[in-house]
Image (cartoon, rainbow, N blue to C red):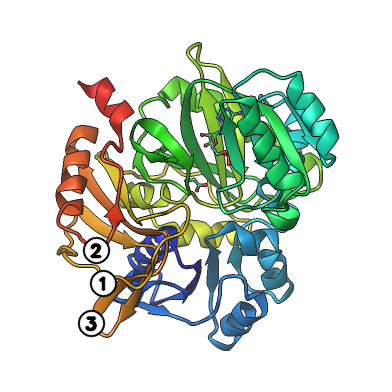
Amino acid sequence: MKVLIVGSGGREHALAWKAKLSQLVDGVYVAPGNGGTANEAGVTNVEIAADDIDGLTNFAQVNEIDLTIVGPEVPLVEGITDKFESLNLNCFGPSKKAAQLEGSKEFMKDFLTRHEIPTAIYESFTDLETALEYLKNSSIPIVIKADGLAAGKGVTVAQSYSEAEKAIRACLENNTFGDAGNKVVVEEFLEGEEASFIVLTDGKTVLPLASSQDHKTRDNEDKGPNTGGMGAYSPAPVVTNEMHEKIMREVITPTIEGLTKEGINYCGFLYAGVMIDNQQNIKVLEFNCRFGDPETQPILMRLESDLVELCFQASKRELQQIELQWNPKVSLGVVMAAGGYPYEYEKGNTIEGLPLETANLKVFHAGTKAKNDLIETNGGRVLCVTALGKNTTEAQLNAYNCVEQIKWKDCFYRTDIGYRAIERES
Ligand code: AMP
Ligand code: GLY
């Protein structure tokens, strides 16, 4: 089978690496891929952008690709799956309609409300004055979200009225996020611990993946600006067996059923970001219509089942209810980023000290480029160093031992990935 992975991040490197391990697969292509996928045995980069839908369908037809797996949200929200399916090409990822769960915060929040799925209280606005009036009557902290896709940068957890006002003005007055910010959702601040709960589904059968937790902010102790994610680990101890059942019952099942009732078939990865409070109540923070990045990296390090087989079955709406097989070890990934990220940063710096990989250690590339025999930085999040260990403490130690050997100009990373799980272990 020939598999095409769409995207160029750490998630796509992990998907390509895992696809290559499948018994069913004899060729893996990544469009456009990165420096890591360029050097991965059995994997070939193809110079087609992830949002060049016509370029991708054309490649899939000419090269007789049996299955395309879409990594990032942008092509999904733009309807890549609809286009592939209209040409009878197997594509694993939700349709344009289904991808609105991520593509529009307002759609997502209204959907949750219609189906009585727990989420923070919210209001959405297109008019600046009305939004500012609502803000005046709200309490602080408060959360401001651009409605559309903003590459993980459209959410502000405001600690003051002035910060909240600035975030609202950025969207509705200054057009900082373009059309994505023409509407804002103003939302109650939730306290608790977050978890990423990701399932693989064909819209009928749902296979929950191992739980994980991501560190979304740039700095240690979950401080600083939001980023795409600075590190993640799996499993997340906050998702106990009871919590797993509760999330399935209160969030995942009603979501898939609600979509079906509304005539929407959801086939793909569905990612629910949930907040769990002290009383073990859960509320949905967000849906993503794709696998998480960096959650994919630690999760796929642990997955022993054949990912390609599952995605292929699902793309044909023939997913079987099976028990997924997991490595019992803990997996933990540390993101190494370019200095300045999530704002301005340099590209083109040579990376040194990349290790020999082992069964317990894998460096997934994100913003990198292979140039001659060297690897250069080519993005904000550059690498995700992922290690296994018998517990989170050991996985963290193994990951940071490797991180400390890798160097480039102005590289930075958090030094506390996994701290919540480690606190529980000690
Ligand atoms: P989102 O893209 O909606 O997940 O938001 C990004 C991050 O902002 C989340 O992972 C949370 O850490 C934080 N966040 C979003 N909504 C809320 C909320 N209502 N209360 C507290 N934190 C939030
Ligand atoms: N790690 C968060 C995300 O993928 O959106």
Comparing marks 3 and 1, which lies closer to the viewer?
1
Distance of label 2 from label 1 (alpha carbons): 6 Å
Q: Nearer the viewer, residue 370 or 167?
A: 167
Q: Nearer the viewer, residue 130 or 256?
A: 130
For disc 3, the neighbor class at 10 Å (few under 14, some 14 to 19, many from 20) is few
Of callouts 2 and 1, the N-terminal one: 1
- Residue under label 2: 408
Residue at x-position 57% and y-position 83%: 59
Please state if 100 lies on the left or on the right of 220 as rendered: right
For disc 2, the neighbor class at 10 Å (few under 14, some 14 to 19, many from 20) is some
Quick check: 382 above or below 133?
A: below
Quick check: 422 above or below 311?
A: above
Quick check: is the Cβ at mark 3 less than 8 Å away from ligand 2?
Answer: no
Residues at discs 2 and 1 in contact (Cβ within 8 Å)? yes
Q: Secondary structure at mark 1?
A: loop
Q: Nearer the viewer, residue 331 or 141?
A: 141
Residue 35 occupies which quadrant of the picture?
A: bottom left
Comparing marks 3 and 2, which lies closer to the viewer?
2
Residue at x-position 66% and y-position 38%: 166
Of callouts 3 and 1, the N-terminal one: 1
- Residue under label 1: 350
Amino acid beneath label 1:
Thr
Distance of label 3 from label 1 (alpha carbons): 11 Å
Relative image position of residue 14 (x, y in whole percent): 38, 60
Please state if 7 lies on the left or on the right of 300 as rendered: right
- Residue under label 3: 373
Residue at x-position 76% and y-position 28%: 113
Amino acid beneath label 3:
Asp
For disc 1, the neighbor class at 10 Å (few under 14, some 14 to 19, many from 20) is some
Q: Secondary structure at mark 2?
A: loop
Residue 360 visible from this viewpoint:
no
